[in-house]
């Protein structure tokens, strides 16, 4: 697909800026060009962060279907929800990199790029001459990012590394779930962990380039990233000799810390972090002031040792209230609490609405709702929330910018080198 008009759909309406108001600053990565040979979630989510900060991100996809995440589902009005989430604000060019002409076009893009990101299968980038060592030698100012499952060497380097597999290898599944049943995280935690370290690694490398003039390699593996996120259970096991148990929504070493049912069928999570809070909970919420000094409940160690009894006392009190009453009483007592929301309730969350966190982005199927990036930018700079691209939507304009004629592009299309 090739279209000249790729302007994103308008964002949500905001009050017009005052004529005397200072113009917002450009986003911090304006002027930075990123070329990404990426698929699935880890690398695409990393480069989407760069796009949100104003970088131009050129996504290189296969002509025969593109990023396979495009076909994960059709939940977003016919588009895949993963793809919509991780790929807004990018330009898509479809190149067959196994054809020398497609690879030459990629190098044409790299000659003007600041960052290259790839998460191809182990060894695939090297076979194409796209490994970071080769690219940094050829383009000294280029920041070359390799995102892998298990790293470039070692006995696991060749293993397939889908998110759930890495969650298992990293031990995340072993500490998630109930005492009877381990479960994976409900989001792609290994992918997201690797993406965010790749994102921060690019920022650090660009900062270094600003002082040295040299780019260089950034290497991130999903296992390394998720192993870092396992810090608490890992250090607990290393130093105590025992892993923390799976406790569902409860906390392994704090009580009460769990979700309790309310009279209207909802659940409210209560977190008591210290003994002063327990006293307030006992007096103002449970209406059992004698429990504040009861040796079986007065300290966290005692409450954890008597977890079943503690949970029963809290559940009995909250079970007679509806969720709104329970939250109101807990908040009045200064006790940390939360509603156990569904994903649909998150989409309608009053805090997100009150802070105007929703926008619309363009896509091949029309405007789609999207959340603002979590990073607030200095100087009033607005995040770049561009459209979700169709496969090969920018192939023609990008190749013309490299000096190709329409006839040459048509020949490449005829041969299946581009789409």
Image (cartoon, helix red, strand yellow):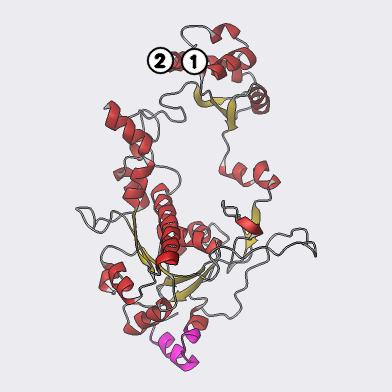
Which label number is shown at residue 305? 2
Going by the picture, which residue comes out furthest to the right?
A: 19
Is 118 magenta? The answer is no
Height in image: 411 above or below 128?
A: below
Between residue 399 and residue 367, name the one nearer to us. 399
Alpha carbon separation for disc pair 1 and 2? 9 Å
- Of label 1 and label 2, which has the lower sequence position? 2
> Mark 2: which secondary structure?
helix
Read off the magenta span. Answer: 399-415
Is 400 magenta? The answer is yes
Residue 242 shows up from this direction: no
Placement of the C terminus among the 4 image quadrants: bottom left
Q: Is residue 246 left or right of residue 265?
A: left
Q: Residue at x 19, y 53 (%)?
A: 155
> Mark 1: which secondary structure?
helix
Residue 260 shows up from this direction: yes
> Marks 1 and 2: CB-CB under 8 Å?
no
Q: Which secondary structure dominates the residues rendered in magenta? A: helix
- Local crowd size for mark 1, using a 10 Å CA cut-off: few (<14), some (14–19), many (≥20): some
Residue 228 occupies quadrant: top left
Q: Is residue 230 left or right of residue 254?
A: left
Height in image: 127 above or below 255?
A: below
Between residue 150 and residue 20, name the one nearer to us. 20
Q: Residue at x 58, y 29 (%)?
A: 337
Which label number is shown at residue 310? 1
Query: Percent from the top left, x then y, of residue 53?
Result: 55, 61
- Local crowd size for mark 2, using a 10 Å CA cut-off: few (<14), some (14–19), many (≥20): some
Residue 161 occupies quadrant: bottom left
Query: Percent from the top left, x then y, of residue 414?
Result: 42, 87
Query: Percent from the top left, x then y, of residue 51?
Result: 52, 64
């Amino acid at each position: 697909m090739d279209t000249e008009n790729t302007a994103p759909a308008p964002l949500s309406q905001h009050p017009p800026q005052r004529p005397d108001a200072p113009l917002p600053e450009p986003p911090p990565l304006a002027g930075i060009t990123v070329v990404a040979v990426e698929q699935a979630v880890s690398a695409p989510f990393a480069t989407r962060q760069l796009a949100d900060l104003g970088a131009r991100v050129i996504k290189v996809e296969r002509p025969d279907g593109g990023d396979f995440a495009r076909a994960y589902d059709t939940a977003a009005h016919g588009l895949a929800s993963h793809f919509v989430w991780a790929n807004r604000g990018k330009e898509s060019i479809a190149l067959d990199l196994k054809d020398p002409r497609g690879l030459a076009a990629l190098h044409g893009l790299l000659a003007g790029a600041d960052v290259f990101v790839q998460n191809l299968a182990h060894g695939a980038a090297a076979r194409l001459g796209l490994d970071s060592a080769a690219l940094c030698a050829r383009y000294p100012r280029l920041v070359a990012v390799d995102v892998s499952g298990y790293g470039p060497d070692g006995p696991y380097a060749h293993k397939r590394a889908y998110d759930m597999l890495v969650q298992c290898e990293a031990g995340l599944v072993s500490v998630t779930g109930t005492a009877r049943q381990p479960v994976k995280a409900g989001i792609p935690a290994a992918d997201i962990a690797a993406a965010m370290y790749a994102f921060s690694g690019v920022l650090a490398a660009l900062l270094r380039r600003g002082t040295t003039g040299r780019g260089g390699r950034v290497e991130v593996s999903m296992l390394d990233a998720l192993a870092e996120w396992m810090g608490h259970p890992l250090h607990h096991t290393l130093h105590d000799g025992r892993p923390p148990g799976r406790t569902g929504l409860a906390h392994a070493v704090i009580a009460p810390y769990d979700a309790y049912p309310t009279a209207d069928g909802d659940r409210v999570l209560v977190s008591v972090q210290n003994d002063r809070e327990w006293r307030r909970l006992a007096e103002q919420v449970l209406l059992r002031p004698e429990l504040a000094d009861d040796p079986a409940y007065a300290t966290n160690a005692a409450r954890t040792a008597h977890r079943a009894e503690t949970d029963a006392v809290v559940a009995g009190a909250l079970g007679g209230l509806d969720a709104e009453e329970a939250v109101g009483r807990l908040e009045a007592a200064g006790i940390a609490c939360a509603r156990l929301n569904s994903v649909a309730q998150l989409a309608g969350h009053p805090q997100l609405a009150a802070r105007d966190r929703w926008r619309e982005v363009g896509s091949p199927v029309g405007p789609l709702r999207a959340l603002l990036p979590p990073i607030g930018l200095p100087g009033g700079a607005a995040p770049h929330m561009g459209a979700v691209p169709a496969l090969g939507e920018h192939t023609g304009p990008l190749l013309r910018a490299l000096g190709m004629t329409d006839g040459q592009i048509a020949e490449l299309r005829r041969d299946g080198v581009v789409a």
